[in-house]
Image (cartoon, rainbow, N blue to C red):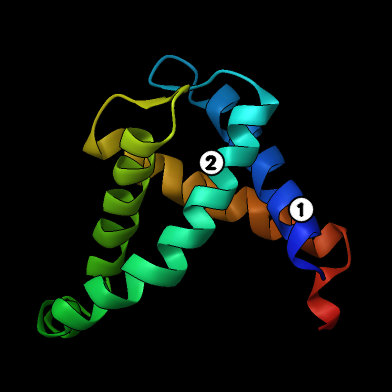
Amino acid sequence: MGFLLRILVSALAAMLTAYLLKPAVKVDSFVTALILALVLALLNALVKPLLILLTFPVTIVTLGLFLFVINALIILLAAKLVPGFKVDGFWWALLFSIVMTIINSVMISLAGGNND
């Protein structure tokens, strides 16, 4: 599945997740969701590997559960960078990360993106 299609699916997943977590997570428009999807893709490609490397001992001790914390921190950083995207706190960012991952996986599998 191409990069553009994955960004579009991620933007739709972000909109749906924000709708489900409405009082605490806010995405202003679909354009904001597209920008959010691009920023999350960049942060996941550039910042997340560095955070995983720096926190590797903690990740091993917690049997990988610390990766959820890293995902929540990436969401909070994206909320600072993207105007029109707001998350009320760490726990909402953690929940947003989990729900968005599930929705994104379902939407990509429905789109037939697991062939590549």
Using the image, determine if residue 22 lies above or below residue 44: above
Using the image, determine if residue 9 lies above or below residue 2: above
Q: Position of residue 111 (x, y in %)?
A: 87, 59
To which residue does mark 2 refer? 36
Using the image, determine if residue 75 lies above or below residue 65: above
Using the image, determine if residue 18 lies above or below residue 105: above
Q: Position of residue 64 (x, y in %)?
A: 27, 77
Q: Is residue 54 left or right of residue 39?
A: left
Q: Amino acid at mark 1?
A: Met
**Image quadrant in which you'd find residue 12:** top right
To which residue does mark 1 refer? 107
Q: Is residue 106 left or right of residue 116?
A: left
| Label pair 2/1, CB-CB below 8 angstroms | no
Quadrant holding the N terminus = bottom right
Kindly state the secondary structure of the residue where label 2 is placed: helix
Kindly state the secondary structure of the residue where label 1 is placed: helix
Residue at (30% x, 41% y) in the render:
76
